[in-house]
Image: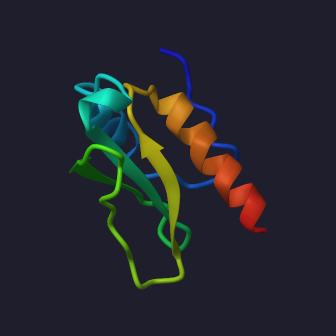
Amino acid sequence: MKTVNTHNLKMIGLKAASSETKGLCGAYSGQYVQIGYDTKTGEVITNYHVSLGANSWTEYHDESIINCGNVFDPMTMQEIANKIAEVVSHRR
């Protein structure tokens, strides 16, 4: 099994996040998963939404939780780790 590169970030829940995306089938289905990351705990957070146009979202009132974007297609653990690392690097 290949090791996931977490870009020197603690990431808890990558496998569960990847599993959450497995049933997604593109932007036109209206289904998507919002990916979040808690910079204090390293928790990867997912929120499943159904909304044509992606106008539904989860908002956290905690500065340590950042929104890493919406996912419309299945993603591997590595793809999610890369997405999180990119967002975190832009916030530093």
Q: Residue furthest top?
A: 1
Q: Does residue 52 appear left or right of residue 12 in this picture?
A: left
Q: Does residue 21 appear left or right of residue 75 in this picture?
A: left
For the residue pair 14 and 58, the one nearer the viewer reads as 58
**Residue 50, image x and y in percent?**
21, 46
Depicted 22 relative to depicted 47: above or below:
above
Q: Residue at x 45, y 26 (%)?
A: 76
For the residue pair 62 and 50, the one nearer the viewer reads as 50
- Residue 22 occupies which quadrant of the picture? top left
Depicted 82 relative to depicted 48: above or below:
above
**Residue 65, image x and y in percent?**
48, 72
**Residue 89, image x and y in percent?**
75, 57
Q: Residue at x 66, y 54 (%)?
A: 87
For the residue pair 3 and 61, the one nearer the viewer reads as 61
- Residue 28 occupies which quadrant of the picture? top left
Depicted 52 relative to depicted 45: above or below:
above
For the residue pair 63 and 14, the one nearer the viewer reads as 63
Depicted 56 relative to depicted 48: above or below:
below
Q: How is the image coloured?
A: rainbow
**Residue 58, image x and y in percent?**
32, 66
Q: Residue at x 24, y 50 (%)?
A: 49
Q: How many marks?
A: 0
Q: Does residue 4 appear left or right of residue 7 in this picture?
A: left
Q: Residue furthest front?
A: 53
Q: Could you tell me which quadrant the C terminus lies in?
A: bottom right
